[in-house]
Amino acid sequence: MENYYSLLGIDQNSSAQEIKRAFREQAKRLHPDIAGKSGEGKMRKLLSAYEVLSDQERRYEYDRVYSRRVQRVEFDYRSFLESQEDDPASQAKLVFFDLLHLDEERALAVWRTQGGLGFPMEQYLNREDWMDCTFILAEELEKRQCYYEAFVLLVNLVREERRKPYFRHFMSDIEGFLKELVRLRLKASVDEETYVVCMETLLELGFSSRDEARWMRSLAETLVQLGDITAARRVFREALKRDPALPNVVQLRRKLNV
């Protein structure tokens, strides 16, 4: 929408006389003898501006519509969300907004301020936005070596996907991300008790027998370190049921007499 006042070179409070004077001055500069054919388009715009602003009723309507249009354009959605710091729904949307606009550091800062893993964003975003937001968050946390937090978010995603598919074919990438995180990063980043809980949670999600057997082996090894031989023996036997050819178990067999 054209700013007719700018076209005439005047401000919005200009009088009818000032509008007429500004039009005449601009029209002289755009006369064909001066501006040639290149001024024809500008002249048409100038005439439109003058016809509207020189008519009191049309000017009033133009001012009303243009003001509303400018307000919409100038509305800063992020600043609005940020100002609603006591509204968790706005803060959840702010986290997602920043992630989508590649402002990951600010997104993570807001997420942590709202409680991190304790922030129930699924209550404030629609399901699809929550799942997308959670996956991006997990990626960013993993990049920053926050492996436990990334693990929890990915587990939540897998659990929800099992309940009602959304990612579908893309889910294999998410599961691969989770399995790689568990295989390479998780154990060294948490204490033994937390790792046991993580493994028990993972085994509830319904992965393949081969995957479960390897996680059970790791769980049994951790239980041995914690001194719970009885539980370790039980878990290890379950692992062998799932995969009788489970590799790297010689030492564990000796420790558990299995």
Image (cartoon, helix red, strand yellow):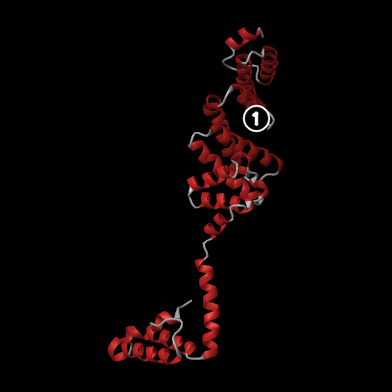
Amino acid under label 1? Leu
Please give the count of numbered marks on the rendered protein.
1
Depicted 30 relative to depicted 128: above or below:
below
In the displayed structure, does residue 109 sit left or right of residue 127? left
Depicted 149 relative to depicted 23: above or below:
above
Q: Nearest the camera: 67 or 153?
A: 67
Residue 178 place in picture, x, y as percent: 58, 34
Residue 197 place in picture, x, y as percent: 65, 26
Q: Nearest the camera: 176 or 47?
A: 47
In the displayed structure, does residue 131 sit left or right of residue 51? right
Q: Secondary structure at mark 1?
A: helix
Residue at 42%, 84% in the rendered image:
45
Residue 210 place in picture, x, y as percent: 63, 25
Depicted 147 relative to depicted 109: above or below:
above
Depicted 145 relative to depicted 254: above or below:
below
Q: Quadrant of residue 182?
A: top right
Residue at 58%, 52% in the rendered image:
85
Outermost residue to the front? 86
Number of other residues with Cα within 10 Å of mark 1, as a class: few under 14, some 14 to 19, many 20 or more: many
Residue 111 place in picture, x, y as percent: 56, 44
Residue at 42%, 92% in the rendered image:
17
Q: Nearest the camera: 30 or 211?
A: 30
The residue tagged 1 is 202
Quarter that holds the C terminus: top right
Q: Quadrant of residue 202?
A: top right
Q: Quadrant of residue 26?
A: bottom left
Residue at 63%, 46% in the rendered image:
121
